[in-house]
């Protein structure tokens, strides 16, 4: 039996995978947009975004627009590569499961 791939634990969380997937499809996204798309709470969303940022998968820009704070997130090249590797590993894992 071939060795099964390991799934990246940083990406493997449901919300973190959703966030990277959403950000892979847009140039940038505001915190409020991500919150609406994921139906997440502010606290949980912030914690998961921080984990992705610490891993180098996201870049963050904080600014004020008409005196209101705005936080913009972008997926980094490392984030795109990690997501692609995760998807490939998942395909291998699922392929192994289907072929057995």
Image: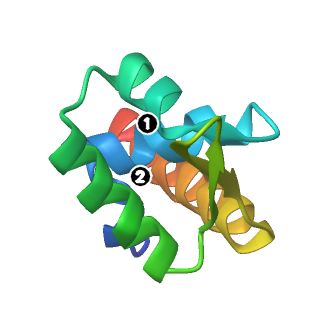
Q: Residues within 10 Å of mark 2 (few under 14, many from 20)?
A: some
Residue 1 visible to the viewer:
no
Outermost residue, front direction?
67
Color theme of the render: rainbow
Q: Which mark is residue 29?
A: none
Helix, strand or loop status at disc 1: helix
The quadrant in which the N terminus is found is: bottom left
- Whichever of callouts 1 and 2 sits on the residue coming sooner in the sequence is 1
Across and down, in percent, residue 14 comes to 28, 41
Across and down, in percent, residue 34 comes to 47, 31
Residue found at x 35% / y 71%: 51
User: Position of 11 compared to 61: left or right?
Assistant: left
**In this orientation, which residue lies closer to the viewer: 55 or 6?**
55
Helix, strand or loop status at disc 2: helix
Q: Is residue 22 above or below residue 89?
A: above
Tally of numbered tags = 2
Residue found at x 29% / y 45%: 45
Mark 2, residue position: 93
Hey, which quadrant is residue 22 in on the image? top right
Mark 1, residue position: 18
Across and down, in percent, residue 16 comes to 37, 50
Q: Is residue 86 above or below residue 65?
A: below
User: Position of 91 compared to 2: left or right?
Assistant: right
Residue found at x 40% / y 58%: 49
Nearer the observer, disc 1 or disc 2? 1
Residue found at x 18% / y 47%: 44
**In this orientation, which residue lies closer to the viewer: 90 or 10?**
10
The quadrant in which the C terminus is found is: top left
**In this orientation, which residue lies closer to the viewer: 63 or 59?**
63
Q: Give the spatial CA distance, label 1 vs label 2.
A: 19 Å
The answer to whether the residue labelled 1 contacts the one labelled 2, judged by CB atoms less than 8 Å apart, is no
């Amino acid at each position: 039996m071939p060795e099964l791939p390991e799934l990246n634990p940083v990406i493997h969380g449901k919300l973190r995978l959703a966030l990277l997937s959403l950000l892979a499809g847009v140039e940038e996204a505001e915190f409020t947009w991500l919150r609406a798309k994921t139906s997440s709470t502010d606290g949980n969303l912030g914690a998961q975004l921080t984990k992705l940022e610490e891993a180098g998968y996201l870049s963050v820009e904080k600014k004020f627009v008409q005196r209101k704070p705005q936080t913009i997130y972008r997926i980094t090249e490392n984030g795109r590569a990690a997501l692609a590797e995760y998807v490939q590993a998942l395909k291998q894992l699922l392929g192994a499961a289907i072929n057995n």
